[in-house]
Image (tube, helix red, strand yellow):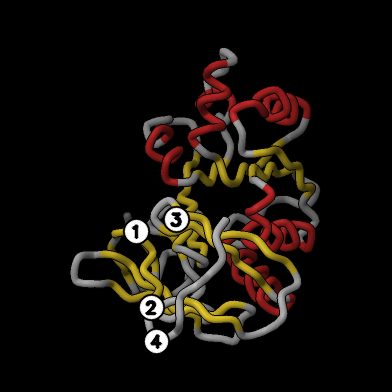
Amino acid sequence: MSAISHSAAEGGAYPARPAAVVGRYLITGQFHFLPASERDIDRAKQAVGRILDTYAFARGRHTLVISTLGDVVQMLPLKLAMVDRNLIVCTADASPYEFGRIRSMIGRFDIAAVFGVTAAVLDGLIASGTDPAALFKGKVVWARPDAYARLQNAADIELRRWIELGPALALECRCGDGAHIDSLEWQLDRADDGELLVSSRLDRALSFVRMATGIRATLTRDLCGCGHPGPRVRP
């Protein structure tokens, strides 16, 4: 991963507060370091918790989080929010070689939701002789864009979008009508060519000013059916 070298004047990132954890964010195929403070993580936990609450998963249900070590800034708030709601968190690596672990946990436990599915995970399952659509049947599945495109025709999966907009995370709620982003934490703008630009609103371990995300999508700011206001991202 490469270090941040953008200045605020250029429309990039600049350090502000000490970090508790350091992960990564991705811009047009390149990884950059993403430090986060305890306050950053806590605010993100509250935001992702609002998405979880649109489902009201029963206490004691199992969930599966598929991630890499670098995903800590995105995944730690999610795990903390699920623990707060008395959900049991299982984990697997976002690797094609984790097919055995993923199959085992889904077979052994009553998995309600799966987070962070990637195309590499789908490739590993298929190579092992496992049909991902059958494995994830009856579950809520938050898939990253490369995996979402491959699962969107699976009739028995409640498929939801997991979209990383540089340092910001957008997740679909139960309504599936665009991915929510925390409007208290992030400002989203749309360039003339449709590329989304992200700015941080609050003090962070690393702050952002109109960071070009490399992602082109539409924005809607109307009230979602789940009751949350915009913005929502629609690829």
The image shows residue 137, relative to residue 17, as above or below, that is above
The x and y percentages for residue 71 are 63, 54
How packed is label 1: few (under 14 Cα within 10 Å), some, or many (20 or more)?
Answer: some
C-alpha distance separating marks 1 and 3: 22 Å
Q: Residue at x 47, y 70 (%)?
A: 227
Q: Secondary structure at mark 2?
A: loop
The image shows residue 11, relative to residue 180, as above or below, that is below
Pointer 2 with pointer 3, Cβ within 8 A: no
**Callout 3 amino acid:** Cys
- Which of the two labelled residues, at mark 1 and mark 3, occupies the earlier sequence position? 3
Residue marked by disc 3: 175
C-alpha distance separating marks 3 and 4: 38 Å
- Which of the two labelled residues, at mark 4 and mark 1, occupies the earlier sequence position? 4
The image shows residue 50, relative to residue 92, as above or below, that is below
Residue marked by disc 1: 215
C-alpha distance separating marks 4 and 1: 21 Å
**Callout 2 amino acid:** Arg
Q: Nearer the viewer, mark 1 or mark 3?
A: 1
Residue marked by disc 2: 210
Pointer 1 with pointer 2, Cβ within 8 A: no
C-alpha distance separating marks 2 and 4: 10 Å
